[in-house]
Amino acid sequence: YMLHETEKQLRDRNKKSRKILLGKVNSFNQIIASRFGFGEVTREGNPKEYFVACVLYKIHSLGVSIENCIFSNDVFLSIYLFRYVYELYIKVFYIFSGASEKEIVARLDEFFNNKKWNFNKIKSQIKDQFLPPQFKEDHQHRYNLLSRFVHPNYESFKLCLNRTDDQQFEFLELNIHLALWYGIEIIKHFSNVEILNFHKNLNKEELNRLQDIGA
């Protein structure tokens, strides 16, 4: 019923955009699912492979949540999901920015042991080659903006107060596109470092298309 009502109240342009967005998320989920089947991996046997497997399953789970978010036109959830993927992106690239294999494994141990990392501190230790231009400079403003909406305050209330379905969808659409972009960057990195055979038969052209907001 919720899906039916949302469909009925969106403008035709946004109905079309919604269909395209769902198609992108579905395509990404299929690409993620195609990476499964790598067999059993353990933290003790190979912590890097184990971490990548955990991230892969989490991103697939997030993809399902993103689809539900679009179906229900849930703008609040879209921000929460984007922030989660954004934080995951930072942690993945911090871990793989270790200067040596030993340092990478040490950072993995910290992650598995739930060490609390200061984002401002760890972002400075991420290799610039892994990040888009101005990422480090813009991080604090971006993260503050995201965090402002995921707490019970007036800013979060205003996401839905006096907002039409179209207005909420247009905000949601941007958040989902960004969540996809960061999630795809993680997958591309796993392919580049050739973990769990990510580099084999991965359709990078399709990934690039999914990252293009205008496509």
Image: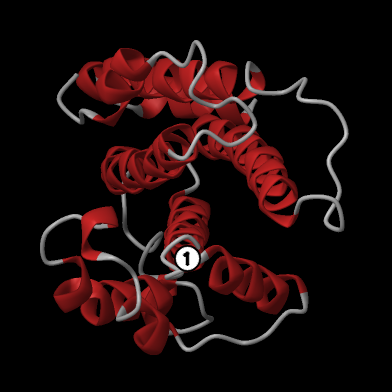
Residue density around tag 1, few if under 14, some if 14–19, many if 20 or more, within 10 Å? some
- Circle 1: element type: helix
Q: Quadrant of residue 198?
A: top right
Task: Give 53 or 65, whichever is nearer the viewer.
Answer: 53
Viewer-closest of 202 and 76 = 202
Image x and y of residue 128, in percent? 22, 64
| Residue reaching furthest to the left | 133
**Relative to residue 61, is residue 108 depicted above or below?**
below
Image quarter (top left, top right, bottom left or bottom right) of the N terminus: top right
Q: Position of residue 175 (x, y in %)?
A: 34, 48
Using the rendered image of the protein, determine whether residue 83 is visible from the camera's viewpoint. Answer: yes
Residue 49 placement, left or right of 102: right
Regarding residue 169, the answer to whether it shows in the image is no
Q: Is residue 73 above or below residue 110?
A: above
* Residue 60 image offset from top left, x and y in percent: 64, 34
Image colouring = secondary structure
- Above or below for 73 versus 90: above
Where residue 211 appears, as percent x and y from the top left, is 28, 31
Q: Amino acid at mark 1?
A: Glu
Q: Residue at x 19, y 18 (%)?
A: 215
Residue at position x 11%, y 59% in the image? 133
Q: Is residue 182 left or right of residue 136?
A: right
Q: Quarter-wise, where is residue 117 in the image?
A: bottom right
**Residue 61 relative to residue 163: left or right:** right
Q: Residue at x 47, y 25 (%)?
A: 25
83 relative to 117, above or below: above
Residue matched to label 1: 87
Give the quadrant of residue 130. Answer: bottom left
